[in-house]
Image (tube, rainbow, N blue to C red):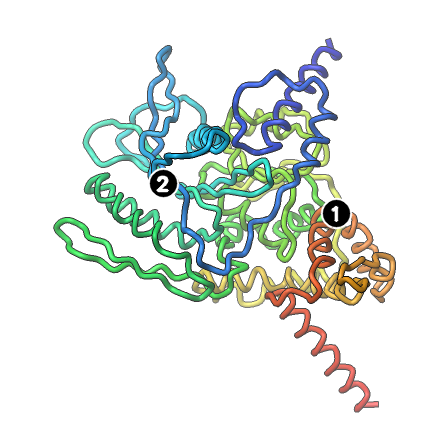
């Protein structure tokens, strides 16, 4: 009996790994993977790429979809189905059509990850959440969702407005969904010209604004301004939910687990809370990008992914808590966002980071946190100490990339680690340099002849200048 169970679990893991190898759009039924080890290799071959930082000029979105619940032919259960699509794609090559069909077939599952047991409702609080799909080539698409109860009387089923884009800017798309919802109350026909105008507009550069002109019956012409945050490395995140659900000590332990690329599962009731918290946890890793399985809300049919032996960061609705707890898992941090507790942990989360730097993060996060008003202030306050942590541990990386005559760089790992004078920092960095997080980052640095002029580089230069000034002051005192 135990052997049979192990084989069944192995097959479940294999299926989940294969599904999330491309996460999605390959959701067609396939024979089960007999060998989970082979699936792991396939996942390793298809490492994801981080969400790119957009300079501006790209299209805002690829699709606007409406996903509704339709009753299945047999039984009383419902299944999510795309009932509206803008734009309709025509004149696609055969391969493009197949890829588009796979993408569109995957989306309904993520708009209604709760399962099929729905019933008509008279009240339903609207939810705003997102999901991430990864293509075969590693590129990512984001689904921005607004789930609500359609206008009307009597019991009815919720529907989802879903915008598919390759751009990570959650605050901006939340405002776009507000405009879609406002027009939805009038007529679907009013949504079309607004989305057409948005599709024809160029995505703004950081700090810039694009203004759309839109006509609404009985209201006249409106001008809608969409402003992109100046600090683009935080435009895809809102740390407020994470701070509301967890203590700063717990957030630090989640960060420590993520830095060593462990398995992290978030549990919460609401899709919005899950989505916002998992995005915030991943954003703490800046300037590094989570390069493994990443699913803000796992659909019920894919819960077997929590058995995967590879690193993952996933969100699961609280209704599936028991299934998750009963699943065979090793070295997982299971975070209950509703009760502010860890249901499972490895046990060493408080010992992963160097003690001095850990205390500095806790102190910085605790200073004046109750006085923050805007989401921009909160984001900067939370992100800053973690960025500073990476500045102090690996900010000297550029000095240890040796370049050939053709400009190709080679990272000098041993010298890089030895350069750290603190033994605690050195012990941590020796582990961190072996992660996929660091490997992907350093590979890009080896290709670039000069360090990228981004926020992280700016903080490195500021830190180096501070050290020079302190050294100069110390000499003067002596």
In screen coordinates, is 111 left or right of 125?
right
Q: Earlier in the sequence, mark 1 or mark 2?
A: 2
Asked whether disc 1 touches disc 2, contact meaning CB atoms under 8 Å apart, the reply is no
Residue under label 2, please give it.
64
Q: Residues within 10 Å of mark 2 (few under 14, many from 20)?
A: many
Question: Where residue 398 sits: x, y (%)?
Answer: 75, 65
Residue under label 1, please give it.
435
Q: Residues within 10 Å of mark 1 (few under 14, many from 20)?
A: some
**Residue 109 in view in this figure:** no
In screen coordinates, is 324 left or right of 123?
right
- Residue placed most toward the observer, 379 or 15: 15
Q: Secondary structure at mark 1?
A: loop
56 in relation to 143, above or below? below
217 in relation to 386, above or below? above
Seen at 62% across and 56% down, the residue is: 286
452 in relation to 132, above or below? below
244 in relation to 271, above or below? below
Using the rendered view, name the quadrant where residue 403 is placed: bottom right
Q: Quadrant of the C terminus?
A: bottom right
């Amino acid at each position: 009996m135990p052997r049979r169970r192990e084989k069944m679990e192995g097959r479940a893991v294999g299926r989940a790994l294969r599904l999330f190898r491309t996460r999605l759009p390959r959701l067609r039924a396939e024979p089960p993977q007999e060998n989970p080890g082979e699936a792991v290799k396939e996942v390793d071959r298809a490492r994801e790429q981080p969400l790119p930082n957009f300079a501006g000029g790209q299209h805002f979105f690829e699709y606007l979809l409406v996903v509704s619940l339709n009753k299945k032919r047999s039984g009383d259960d419902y299944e999510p189905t795309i009932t509206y699509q803008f734009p309709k794609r025509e004149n696609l090559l055969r391969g493009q059509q197949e890829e588009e069909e796979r993408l569109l077939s995957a989306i309904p599952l993520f708009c209604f990850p709760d399962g099929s047991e729905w019933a008509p409702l008279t009240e339903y609080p609207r939810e705003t959440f997102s999901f991430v799909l990864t293509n075969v080539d590693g590129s990512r698409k984001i689904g921005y969702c607004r789930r609500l109860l359609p206008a009307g009387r009597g019991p009815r089923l919720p529907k989802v407005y879903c915008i598919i884009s390759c751009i990570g800017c959650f605050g901006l798309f939340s405002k776009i969904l507000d405009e879609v919802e406002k027009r939805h109350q009038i007529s679907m026909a009013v949504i079309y010209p607004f989305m057409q105008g948005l599709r024809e507009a160029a995505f703004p550069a950081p700090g810039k604004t694009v203004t759309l002109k839109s006509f609404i019956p009985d209201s006249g012409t409106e001008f809608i301004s969409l402003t992109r945050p100046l600090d683009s490395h935080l435009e895809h995140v809102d740390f407020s939910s994470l701070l509301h659900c967890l203590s700063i000590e717990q957030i630090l332990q989640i960060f420590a687990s993520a830095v060593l690329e462990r398995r992290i599962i978030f549990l919460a009731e609401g899709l919005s809370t899950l989505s916002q918290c998992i995005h915030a946890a991943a954003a703490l890793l800046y300037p590094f990008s989570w390069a493994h399985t990443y699913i803000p809300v796992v659909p019920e049919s894919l819960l077997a992914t929590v058995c995967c032996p590879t690193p993952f960061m996933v969100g699961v609705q609280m209704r599936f808590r028991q299934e998750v707890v009963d699943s065979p898992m090793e070295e997982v941090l299971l975070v209950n966002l509703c009760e502010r507790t860890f249901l499972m942990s490895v046990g060493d989360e408080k010992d992963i980071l160097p003690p001095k730097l850990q205390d500095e993060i806790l102190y910085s996060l605790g200073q004046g946190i109750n006085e923050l008003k805007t989401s921009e202030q909160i984001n900067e306050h939370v992100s800053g100490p973690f960025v500073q942590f990476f500045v102090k541990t690996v900010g000297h990386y550029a000095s240890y990339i040796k370049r050939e005559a053709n400009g190709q760089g080679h990272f000098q790992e041993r010298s890089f680690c030895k350069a750290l004078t603190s033994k605690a920092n050195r012990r941590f960095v020796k582990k961190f340099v072996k992660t996929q997080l660091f490997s992907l980052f350093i590979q890009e640095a080896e290709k670039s002849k000069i360090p990228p002029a981004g926020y992280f580089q700016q903080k490195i230069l500021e830190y180096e200048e501070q050290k020079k000034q302190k050294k100069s002051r110390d000499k003067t005192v002596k």
